[in-house]
């Protein structure tokens, strides 16, 4: 069994996953509602919303979609986090730095040494929380 983070967005899923691909690498696949047989069940203005997105490869594995539930609204940023672990090397530090572009400054904890390894966290420009823990090596 594997655990894969699943992120929900409010119309900007494709933009967010493209940004994450640019920061972390991997292959991105996106399916929009209008490309599926389900499109007839939804208004035409929702057909550009992402029904399924996956970013995978090179140690990255994220799934996501745009919010589709009509009776509930999304609460951004506080219902999920992506936990990034690995060696505290240059690639690890570079991924963290790229994700800080447009990040919420008041919630940014720059990478810093802790007893258990290198640690940092941020809420990115899409409201998603990222927690980094790099091995001491």
Image (cartoon, rainbow, N blue to C red):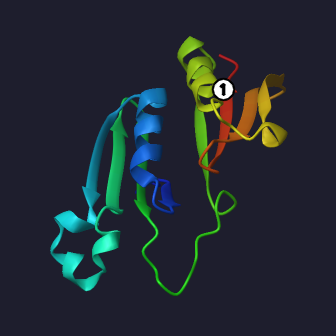
Asked if 52 appears above or below 18 in the picture, the reply is below
Q: Residue furthest bottom?
A: 71
Give the percent coordinates (x, y) of residue 125: 62, 42
Question: In the image, is 117 to the left or to the right of 47?
Answer: right
Give the percent coordinates (x, y) of residue 63: 40, 53
- For residue 2, say whether it is visible: no
Q: Nearer the viewer, residue 119 or 135?
A: 119
| Residue 41 position by quadrant | bottom left
Residue that mark 1 sits on? 134
Asked if 134 appears above or below 8 in the picture, the reply is above
Q: Residues within 10 Å of mark 1 (few under 14, many from 20)?
A: many
Question: In the image, is 109 to the left or to the right of 9?
Answer: right
Q: Residue furthest left?
A: 37
- The residue drawn where x is 59% and y is 48% is 126
Give the percent coordinates (x, y) of residue 17: 43, 44
Asked if 36 appears above or below 32 in the picture, the reply is below
- The residue drawn where x is 74% and y is 41% is 104
């Amino acid at each position: 069994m594997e655990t894969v983070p699943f992120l929900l967005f409010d119309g900007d899923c494709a933009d967010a996953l493209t940004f994450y691909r640019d920061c972390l690498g991997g292959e991105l696949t996106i399916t929009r509602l209008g490309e599926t047989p389900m499109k007839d069940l939804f208004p035409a203005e929702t057909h550009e919303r992402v029904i399924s997105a996956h970013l995978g490869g090179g140690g990255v594995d994220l799934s996501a979609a745009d919010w589709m539930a009509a009776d509930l609204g999304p609460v951004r940023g506080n219902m999920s986090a992506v936990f990034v672990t690995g060696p505290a090397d240059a690639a690890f530090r570079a991924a963290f730095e790229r994700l800080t572009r447009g990040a919420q400054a008041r919630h940014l904890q720059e990478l810093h040494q802790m007893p258990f390894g290198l640690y940092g966290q941020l809420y990115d420009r899409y409201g998603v929380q990222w927690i980094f823990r790099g091995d001491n090596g």
